[in-house]
Amino acid sequence: MFKFYGFQNLKKFKKIQELHFFKTRLRSYCLFFENYLCVFVLRTNFGLTMHFSKTGVLLSFFAVNRKIITNPFFKFKLGDDISVNKHKFHVLYPRVFEVFQTKKVLINMPGYIYFDYSSCVGSI
């Protein structure tokens, strides 16, 4: 299910996306996977792999509308605020800062995701 969110070229990604969305006949294809909390964490570079993203959510590193969520496949709605848990901020943010310094950042954040890294609050 998540194998096409890794390091692939754009042509393979689009082909898998077209096959999947033709099969399920979704109208809003951009929000089907993007509204999972673990995918949002991966897209915003708070998790370099899907495993790290799921683990971060399970360890209650993230909150949706100031409520701590531990389900990695929690589906949030448009306009919800996703933020880093203030009690776990000191654990997570140095790792993310180190990733930005070493320039091992995945450049896969689409235009419809807004994330403010200074306040660690994002929305879709």
Image (cartoon, helix red, strand yellow):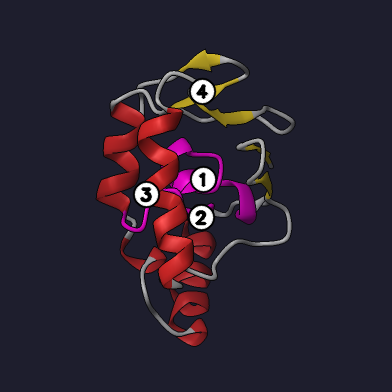
Tell me if residue 88 can be seen: yes
Q: Nearer the viewer, residue 29 or 103?
A: 103
Local SS, label 2: helix
Q: Nearer the viewer, residue 55 or 32?
A: 55
Kind of residue sitting beneath label 2? Arg
Alpha carbon separation for disc pair 4 and 3: 18 Å
Tell me if residue 73 can be seen: no
Quadrant of the rendering where the N terminus is positioned: bottom left
Which of label 1 and label 4 is nearer to you? 4
Alpha carbon separation for disc pair 2 and 3: 16 Å
Quarter of image, res 54: top left
Alpha carbon separation for disc pair 4 and 2: 16 Å
**Above or below, 110 relative to 15:** above
> Which residue is rendered at x = 48% and y = 23% of the image?
85
Local SS, label 1: helix
Q: Residue 95 shows which numbered tag?
A: 3
Q: Residue 43 shows which numbered tag?
A: 2
Q: Earlier in the sequence, mark 2 or mark 3?
A: 2
Q: Nearer the viewer, residue 9 or 31?
A: 9
Q: What residue is disc 4 on?
A: 63
**Above or below, 47 relative to 83:** below
Q: Earlier in the sequence, mark 3 or mark 1?
A: 1
Q: Which residues are magenta?
A: 29-49
**Above or below, 11 relative to 87:** below
Mark 1, other Cα within 10 Å: few <14 / some 14–19 / many ≥20: many
Local SS, label 4: strand
